[in-house]
Amino acid sequence: MAPKEIRLDRHVAASPDQVWAVLTDLDSAEQTLSGVTRVERVAGDGYEVGTRWRETRKMFGKEATEEMWVAEVDAPHRTVVKAHSSGTDYTTAFTVTGAGSGTDLTMVFSAEVGSPSFVTKLLMAVFGGIGTKATRKAMATDLDDIAARAEAAGR
């Protein structure tokens, strides 16, 4: 099944280096991202390919924890984070681009279901819109939170 992709862009009134520093600061993610309730580092120091952590978020009134890892880093321009859960591969790519006196931050999220059953396909067709809307809202909140932290650091 083809991956479903959501893309959001956010202009940040901070330098690319400030945005990158916030984006890659896993140890402060709980304080930065209002949707994240807990981050537990599993492997690696700092932020590099192979760094792994468990991230707990509250969605639909319930907490869910997923193990995530850094799959790609091209500092300070682009990073890719991956996760795998219940037969689905999740990929989130962030791109940091200087724009005038600030930064354009792009977030692209995709989910690819391995071999979905008929029931899974049916559920995705019925409830896919709700999940997409919730994911888009969580992404927008994350981008706003990253922007707020980077802009505060630049003052």
Image (cartoon, rainbow, N blue to C red):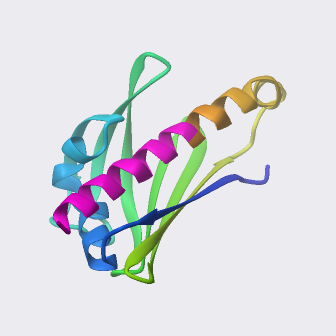
Point out residue 33 in the picture as x, y percentages from the top left corner.
31, 43
**Residue 121, image quadrant:** top right
Evaluate whether residue 6 shows in this view: yes
Principal SS element in the magenta part? Answer: helix
Q: Point out residue 83 in the picture as x, y percentages from the top left corner.
A: 46, 50
Residue 152 included in the magenta stretch of the image: yes
Q: Is 30 inside the magenta-drawn segment?
A: no
Residue positioned 68% across, 54% down in the render: 5
Q: Quadrant of the C terminus?
A: bottom left
Who is closer to the viewer here, 23 or 154?
Answer: 154
Residue occupying image coordinates x 24% and y 69%: 21
| x and y, in percent, of residue 125 in the image | 82, 30
Q: Nearer the viewer, residue 54 or 26?
A: 26
What residue do we see at 73% from left, 31% from top? 128
Left or right, 119 with reference to 141: right
Residue with the most extreme top position: 61
Residue found 19% across the figure and 43% down from its top: 31
Q: Which residues are magenta?
A: 137-155
